[in-house]
């Protein structure tokens, strides 16, 4: 079962934006953070697996599970290895992703094609801002 007709048109964009996670994986590996690199690589693989043929099923559940595991792992990394500024930065990113996800879900239920842009924003936040918070701040 396909998600919607607009998803078929936008799934190519979301498929390509999934490569942001590959870039995040390479950056993590270059900073000798192998576990974060593996989490981002797993998220990259589950994301491209879902968006190449966007339907609800095992690929979607694996993608969501990988997102949740990465979020929990990153929270522990920020909490245990970094100072309070980094924890606040991560929590702000997490809240932003959550609200964008809620808005995306409402637009998806209304079959409005702008939900694809919001999901693209989630891919960007989840890949680049976590890397900035981990390695550049």
Image (cartoon, grey):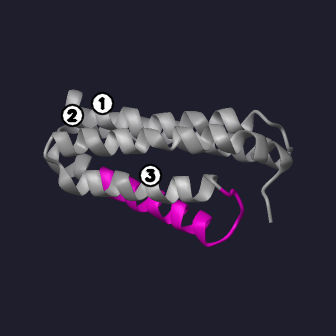
Residue 98 against residue 121 in the figure, above or below = below
Q: Is residue 115 magenta?
A: no
Where residue 119 appears, x then y in whole percent? 62, 40
Q: Which residue is mark 3?
A: 44
- Total marks placed: 3
Location of residue 109 with respect to 133 vertically, above or below: below
Q: How much space separates mark 1 and mark 2, taking CA atoms?
A: 6 Å
Which secondary structure lies at badge 3?
helix
Binning the other alpha carbons within 10 Å of mark 3 as few (below 14), some (14 to 19) or many (20 upward) gives many
**Residue named by callout 1:** 132
Q: Which of label 1 and label 3 is nearer to you?
A: 3
In this rendering, does residue 137 appear at all?
no
Which residue does the numbered mark 2 point to in the structure image? 135
Q: Nearer the viewer, residue 5 or 104?
A: 5
Image marks 1 and 2: residues in contact by CB distance under 8 Å: yes
Q: Position of residue 49 (x, y in %)?
A: 55, 59
Upstream in sequence: badge 1 or badge 3: 3
**Structural distance between the alpha carbons of marks 2 and 3:** 19 Å
Would you say residue 60 sits in the magenta stretch?
yes
Give the magenta part as a residue range.
53-76
Residue at 62 percent across and 52 percent down: it is 51
Instruction: Name the front one of labels 2 and 3.
Output: 3
Name the element at disc 2. helix
């Amino acid at each position: 079962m396909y998600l919607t007709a607009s998803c078929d048109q936008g799934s190519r964009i979301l498929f390509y934006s999934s490569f942001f996670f590959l870039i995040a994986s390479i950056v993590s590996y270059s900073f000798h953070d192998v576990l974060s690199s593996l989490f981002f690589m797993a998220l990259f693989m589950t994301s491209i697996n879902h968006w190449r043929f966007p339907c609800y099923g095992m690929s979607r559940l694996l993608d969501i599970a990988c997102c949740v595991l990465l979020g929990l792992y990153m929270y522990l990394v920020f909490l245990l290895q970094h100072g309070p500024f980094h924890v606040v930065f991560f929590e702000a990113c997490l809240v932003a992703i959550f609200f964008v996800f809620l808005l995306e879900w409402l637009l998806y239920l209304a079959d409005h094609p702008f939900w694809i842009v919001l999901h693209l924003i989630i891919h960007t936040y989840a890949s680049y801002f976590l890397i900035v918070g981990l390695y550049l701040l």
